[in-house]
Image (spheres, grey):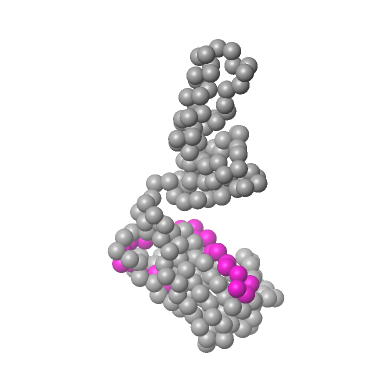
Amino acid sequence: MAQSFALPTLNDAASTAIATTIANALSALVTHHSGGTAPTTTYAFMTWADSSAGVLKIRNAADSAWISFGPIDETWTWRCPSVVLTGGISGTGTLYIDVPEHSFYVQDLVVLSDTTTSGSDGSNNWAVQVQNLTQANSLKATAWDSNTDAELTADTATVVVLDQNQTVAAADVLEVQLTMTGAPTALSSAQVFFQLRGWHI
C-alpha cells in the first residue's frame, strides 16, 4: 500500500512522473498511509494505519511521536463503568465486573487512587491483578507492582497494560484485585477507582 505523500515539484518534468506522484499521494491519504512500518516523511496530525500492530495512529502536534488512536479492525471502544473500592482496604480489595453481551478485547486497566503510595520495596507493596474467573486465567502475566512498576500517585491515573488472555467472551466475569504485601502506604481510608478499557470484537 502506498505511504508516500510527497507532492510533485517543478522538477518533475515528465507528466507521467507527476501523475504517478499524485496517484501515490492520494492512495496514501485515503488508506491512512497503511503499512507495517511508519512512513518516512511525517507531518503533525498525520494518520498511519499500523498494519503490524493493528492500530490506527496519529502524529502528535510536535510531529515527534505517534499516538495510538484505536484498533483498525474493531468496531468501537469499550469502557467499563468505573468501579470503586472505598475504605477498609487493609489487605485485599476485590471487585467483580460482568462483561456485557458482546465479546471484547481488554487492553488495559486504569487505576485512580486518592492516596499516594511511597517507599514501596520488595517486602512492602501493593499489587494489582485482573483475572477472568469464567475462563480461569489472568489477563496480566505478572501483577502490576508498586515496587517494580510504579507508585500510585494521588488523583493521577495509573494505566496497567494487560498482556495475555485479553479476549473475553460475553457474560464472562472479570475480577480486579488489589493486594497488600507487608506494610506499604496504607489505603485503609482511600478510594481507589478502576476502569477496564478495550474494544468490541
Q: Is residue 139 magenta?
A: no
Regarding residue 146, the answer to whether it shows in the image is no
Q: Residue at x 63, y 67 (%)?
A: 150
Provide the major secondary structure of the magenta segment. loop
Q: On screen, 50 above or below 123?
A: above
- Range drawn in magenta: 153-175
Q: Is residue 134 above or below residue 49?
A: below
Residue 109, image x and y in percent?
49, 65
Q: Quadrant of residue 145?
A: bottom right
Q: Where residue 106 sits in the image (x, y, percent)?
A: 43, 60
The answer to whether residue 99 is left or right of residue 157 is left
Q: In which quadrant of the rendered view does residue 30 lie?
A: top left
Q: Is residue 160 inside the magenta stretch? A: yes
Taking the spot 48% from the left edge, 38% from the top edge, the residue there is: 32
Left/right placement of residue 148 relative to residue 75 reads right
Residue occupying the point 35% across, 70% down: 98
Question: As drawn, which residue projects farthest toward the top?
Answer: 14
Q: Is residue 156 above or below residue 40?
A: below
